[in-house]
Image (tube, grey):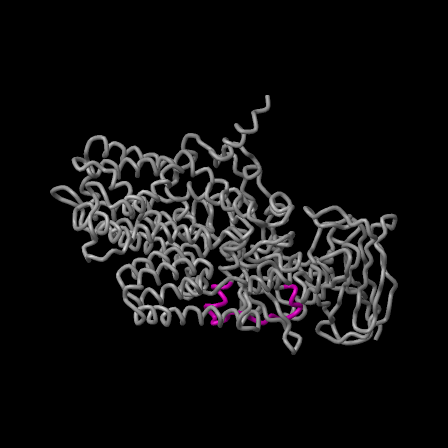
Amino acid sequence: MTLPAFVQTFRVLAGAWDFPPDVPSTVAAGLALTALALALFGRGRFILGLGPAPLTRKLFLWTTAFAAALSSVAYIAVYLRGGPRIIDATTYFLQGRALSHFDFAWTELGPSSSFRGRFLLSRELPDGTSLIGGIFPPGFPLLLSFGFALGAPMVVGPALAAGLVVATYRLAHSLAEEAFGESPSCEVTARTAALLSVFCGALRYHTADTMAHGAAALGVVIAFDAASKRQCTWAGLIVGAVAATRPMSALPIAVVSLWLLRKGGLRALTSFVVATLPGVAFLLLAQHAVTGTWFTSSQRMYYALSDGPPDCFRWGFGHAIGCVYEHGEFVAARLSKGFGLTSALGTTVRRLAMHLRDVANLEPLALLIMVPAWRSASRSGPHAHPRKAGGDTQLAGAAVALVGLHILAYFPFYFDGNYPGGGARMFADMLPIEHALVAVAIVLFASKARPTQAPLLVLSLSLGGFATHAAFDHLKLQARDGGRPMFEPDLLAKAGVSTGLVFVDTDHAFNLGHDPSAVALRHVVVARLRNDDRDSLLFNRLGRPPSYLYKFDASTSPAERTTTVITPATDSVTKPEIVPWTPPSPTSTWRFEAEAAWPPLSQNAAFAVPVFTDTCASNGKALLVTPASVESSGSATIDLPVPESGLYEVVPRVVHRARLPHMTPRSPLTPSGKLSLVESSWEWVASEGAEACVDLLAKEVRLVAPTARMTVDAQGGAVAVDRVMLRRIK
């Protein structure tokens, strides 16, 4: 029997509910029952700083900070299974490793396509070499670089977790002073906020995986607290650091900080602005190193070279917004009519729906965020008390305004960015602010006779929410992409691999394993398996070192595909394998796959992406070039490796009827293509009646090592190039 649509929608929004499915959720359930018992029996006052023998502030902060850090370490072990999992996190990881060698970008021994790929921006230098760098801002990679210097990059997240507890405590104390004046309620509020931070499942993820949101959240809460105390320079320095970490998240906290500092006059505002400059300069320096220009976003340049339609990745509204390769399924489902106000509202609502769970593991608790601002605005009731300093600054209102401005800042960005475990990550930077606001709301509702009962009850609900509800999101994260990191250095050590060349076939594995400073004869060089003669070319150029394949099937596990409750018993974990492997040497002809050259060197009124095609194509894939408009032509330029300078017989192969998933059906026009290499060119018509794969006419072309540029033009629709065969003539 099919359930009504509204019932199905409610079930999706409500999420999974069941008994605790694993050890962390069982521990959370035990703590929830303990907190409930303490609340019901009037115990536990000492934890929140009350009673005849209260836990000292210093001991409380040390204990809770350590608990948060330890919980994030446990998250790494249990849910991440030892290392970064999503592609963004692995890219940050690679950027952190490179920055530990003082490199924002780095040069690679060719062929460059053995080292570039998703979320890496490559640009060709005048000498023919390629400069490669990660596309994300440098703030969080800088923190990771310190971890790499210590030999333990994964400790950075847990250290941030500890810092978040202390910073949340301090901010909540400031908000409580405004709401309650000097009273024991301030300490109760601050400790409640700190405990909410410890028990927040979303923060455990963002201080475990190598994502920048934990660092941005810490920067935002420190900057807000500093601005509220008129610490102009310190607030400016931290806002600058946030700008170098997540630039868009820096705008709301900058605006609110300026508003909080306005009473200090022009001198205070100037000090704040000047103090932000080091962080902004650091961001610009990194962007210049990666893009070659000072004021170009590396992310926007990457999408301009790797995706489409042109200018698909940006803040704003329009018909062409939404990148159809990186976010194709989302764009097809949500943005078929473009990205307008209605689409933006839908995206924001979906983020908020998930973010409600992120705040305190249980959606209704997040609604408490608005209470302090409302109570502060009314300035009535028994708890209303002027701020001790005597000013009229409404910190609670400013905190709520910061949350609102942050939501507005991401309103014009088309992609949800939500995923299980990470939650509504676009809003994760606000979690410490929200924990402080929720804590104030709880104490506002607390009974004067039993002031710790309400905080303990809410903490019990939060822990119970994780145990029976939110934990299932984290299990989905645990099960995705093969159920473990796609590259684990420990497995190389166990296999006795300490030098040589290791080929991997996923972007995640490359980002986790590659060290730009490695030399094959003294270290392990991790490169991409291209399944063509690029592998042999790289092997020879590195001096024919010992070489291996790192095999890992990252296909979606059954546990990730199911829509029912996920338990560890149903989770299938892929086992990686390391095997010796030597790339086959070409006999008389070199084969270079066109799709292996993605992202292309340039795109002009078109975009080029790898797609699966007819099985007649080698590796079953080709590079599809799609013009921005079928009424006009567009082109993409890729690099073609040249083993050594000389005269070659060149035979390109094209594929007919190839298309990108989630794109609109083929144009009624007949697409035509043109391939240009040096002074030679090939033209063809991609007619429906032609064979799926066609080898174009062989031509003699003089090529100069190490690379040649090849341009593919498309008109009237998409055309696909499978491979190029090179045979040395002389």
The region drawn magenta spans: 95-114
Q: Is residue 490 visible?
A: yes
**Count of numbered marks:** 0
Q: Residue 441 location, x and y as percent?
A: 29, 42
In which quadrant of the rendered image does the C terminus lie?
bottom right
Quarter of the image where one finds residue 144: bottom left
Q: Nearer the viewer, residue 286 or 185?
A: 185
Q: Is residue 288 above or below residue 575?
A: below
Is residue 642 found left or right of 577 in the rendered image?
right
107 in the magenta segment = yes
Q: Nearer the viewer, residue 343 or 568?
A: 343
Is residue 559 found left or right of 613 in the rendered image?
left
279 in the magenta segment = no
Residue closest to the far left: 52
Q: Nearer the viewer, residue 527 or 314?
A: 314
Q: Is residue 277 above or below residue 689?
A: below
In which quadrant of the rendered image does the N terminus lie?
top right
Is residue 143 found left or right of 589 in the rendered image?
left
Residue closest to the far top: 1
Q: Residue 596 location, x and y as percent?
A: 69, 60
Residue closest to the far bottom: 127
| Residue at the image position 30 percent from the left and 72 percent from the top | 267
Q: Residue 718 location, x and y as percent?
A: 76, 55
| Residue at the image position 38 percent from the left and 63 percent from the top | 239
Quarter of the image where one finds residue 450: top left
Q: Is residue 522 visible?
A: no
Q: Residue 625 location, x and y as percent?
A: 73, 58
